[in-house]
Amino acid sequence: MILNLITSVCERVKASFSRISKDDKGIGVVEVILILVVLIGLVVIFRDQLTSLVNTIFGRIAEDAGGI
C-alpha cells in the first residue's frame, strides 16, 4: 500500500516535470521548492515504513546473492 502510494506520487511528479519541460514558460523556483517540500514531508511521514521496506528489499537481495 505504501509502495503503491510512493509509486503514484513519483509518477505524478514525473508527469508534472514532463509537462513543465514542454512548457515554454519554464518553471519557477517556488514551484521546485514546493515539490521538494512535499517529497521531503512524505519521506518524514513514512520514514519508518520506508526504512522497513528498504531493509526487507536488501535482505532479500542478500539472501538471493548468497544462493548464487
Image (spheres, rainbow, N blue to C red):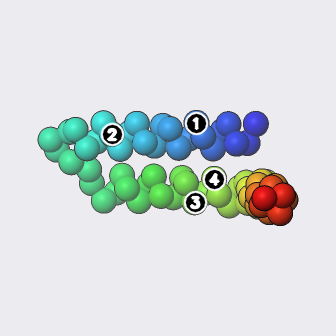
Disc 3 marks which amino acid? Ile
Asked which quadrant contains residue 7, the reply is: top right
Marks 2, 4: nearer the viewer = 2
Q: Label 2 crowding class (10 Å Cα cut-off): few <14, some 14-19, many 20+?
A: few
Marks 3 and 4, Cα distance to the nearest angstrom?
5 Å
- Label of residue 18 in the image: 2
Q: Nearer the viewer, residue 38 or 9?
A: 9
Q: Label 4 crowding class (10 Å Cα cut-off): few <14, some 14-19, many 20+?
A: few
Q: Which of marks 3 and 1 is nearer the N terminus?
A: 1
At horizontal 36% and vertical 52% (from top left) the residue drawn is 31
Disc 2 marks which amino acid? Ser
Left or right of 1 in this view: 36? left
The residue that mark 3 highlights is: 40
State if disc 4 and disc 3 touch (CB < 8 Å). Answer: yes
Say which element carries label 1.
Answer: helix
x, y percent for residue 65: 77, 61
Left or right of 17 in this view: 5? right
x, y percent for residue 53: 77, 53
- Label of residue 35 in the image: none
Quadrant holding the C terminus: bottom right
The residue that mark 1 highlights is: 8
Say which element carries label 4.
Answer: helix
Disc 1 marks which amino acid? Ser
- Label of residue 42 in the image: 4
Q: Which of 39 and 52 is in front in this view?
A: 52
